Structures are given as C-alpha cells and as structure tokens.
Image (tube, grey):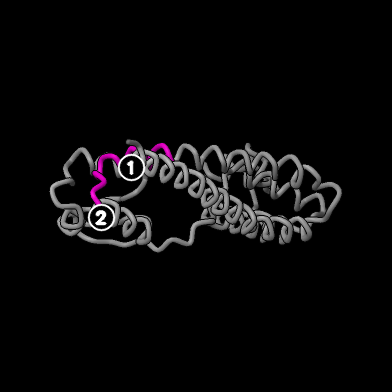
C-alpha cells in the first residue's frame, strides 16, 4: 500500500474508487502498475515514467514514444566481455598486476570483480592492451592513457548529444515520433564513423610528424 500511495503522490497512478474507507483498484490500475514495473526494469526513472504516461494520456502513441526511447538507449557498444580468474589476468601482464593496478582498472570501468572472477568489458580492448604491453609499453602508462582517452570520449559524446538535442530532438513538434526514431537510428553509425575517421586522420598526421623527426635526426651530421 505504501508503494501505491507513493505512485499516486508522484502522479503515476490515479487514486482508487472509494467505497467508504475502502479503496477499490481496477484492472486499469493493475495494467498501469505492470507498465510501471516493466519501465523500471528497463532503467527508466520514475520521473521519466511519469512523462511517458502523461504522453500516453494525452493521446500520443506510447509505442512510438518507447520506440524513440529504444533508439536512444540501445547500447552503442557491441564489445564482447571476457571473464577469467585474477591469476589468469595477471599472467597476461607478468609482473605488472598488483592491488593498485587492479583498483585503477576497476575505477576506470575496464574490469569488474565478482569473488575470484574478473570480467573485462571488451575482449578486443584487452587483446590490444596485451599487445601494447608485449611491445614494451608499461601497463601503468596504458591505464593513465586510458583515463585521458575516456575523458576525451566523454567530451565528444557530450558534444554529439548537444547537437542531436538541439537540432533533431528539438524539432520533435515538427515531425512524428516514428520519423524521429528512424532519424536517430540513422545517426548512430554516422557518429561512430566520424570518431573513427577523425582518429585515423589524426594518427596519420602524428605518424608523419614523428617519422619526419626521426629521419631528420638520422640525417643530421
């Protein structure tokens, strides 16, 4: 009953029909409670659910509303996680895995620890890290670079979201939700390609500059 009262206070659930001191809930109440539970399971906040239900009550197609939500919140990463023991992880980086490095990796979101099992979020990234360490780059330096890279990626993601919010979602009154869903779906690969192509171009510039500097050193008398 406390949950029902809380939902009513947050305008998620209409009050029951009263017969004396008894509140009678209908099938409509039960349907709404099931919808709230499903949306909570999908990660929605109660405020977000209230807005969705408000849109539904105003005659908007909640299926279309949820279609937009799915287009926006579907995970962008398609990375495959890999799970192993801590000893197996340490064996990949001989002499470089200690309590401090494990703590840093957890804090940066690279790994999660559950008992004696360690899960790295991306098999590809783990393999790339192993390759760098085998080439002579210290694991500590890779973790430091990873933190800086994450900050840069967060800034890029925030910039992209601002553009979408301003120029696409901001025009929601000018297009139906179905069209908005399709637009958002088309924009996803474009954002990823932009970052990938931009990084590749930057690497070309940096590699050429480094090679020119190296050749100049060798050519010096």
Residue 77, image x, y percentages:
49, 57
| Image-quadrant location for residue 138 | top left
Q: Which numbered disc covers residue 140?
A: none
Mark 2: give few (<14), some (14-19) or many (20+) Cα within 10 Å.
Answer: many
Would you say 28 lies left or right of 42 here? Answer: right
Would you say 80 lies left or right of 163 here? Answer: left
Give the residue furthest to the right: 174
Q: Secondary structure at mark 2?
A: strand
Name the N-terminal-most of marks 2 and 1: 2
Which sits in the foreground, 141 or 185?
A: 141
Residue 178, image x, y percentages:
77, 60
Q: Residue at x 69, y 49 (%)?
A: 52
Of marks 2 and 1, the one in the foreground: 1
Would you say 160 lies left or right of 103 here? Answer: right
Q: Secondary structure at mark 1?
A: helix
How many marks on residues? 2
Residue corresponding to mark 1: 218
Whether residue 19 is visible here, answered yes or no, is no
- The residue range painted magenta reads 134-149
């Amino acid at each position: 009953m406390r949950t029902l009262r809380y939902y009513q206070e947050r305008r998620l659930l209409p009050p029951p029909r009263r017969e004396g001191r008894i509140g009678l809930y209908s099938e409509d109440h039960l349907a709404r409670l099931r919808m709230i539970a499903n949306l909570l399971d999908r990660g929605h906040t109660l405020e977000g659910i209230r807005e969705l239900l408000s849109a539904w009550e105003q005659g908007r197609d909640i299926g279309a509303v949820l279609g937009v939500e799915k287009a926006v919140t579907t995970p962008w990463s398609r990375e495959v996680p890999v799970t192993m023991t801590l000893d197996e992880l340490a064996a990949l980086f001989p002499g470089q895995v200690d309590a401090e490095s494990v703590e840093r990796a957890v804090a940066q979101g690279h790994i999660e620890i559950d008992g004696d099992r360690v899960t790295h979020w991306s098999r590809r990234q783990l393999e790339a890290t192993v390759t760098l360490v085998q080439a002579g780059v210290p694991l500590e330096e890779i973790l430091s670079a990873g933190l800086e890279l994450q900050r840069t990626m967060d800034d890029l993601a925030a910039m992209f979201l601002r553009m979408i919010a301003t120029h696409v979602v901001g025009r929601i009154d000018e297009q139906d939700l179905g069209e908005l869903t399709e637009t958002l779906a088309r924009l996803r690969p474009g954002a990823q390609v932009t970052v990938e192509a931009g990084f590749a171009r930057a690497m070309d510039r940096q590699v050429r500059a480094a090679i020119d500097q190296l050749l100049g050193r060798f050519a010096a008398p």
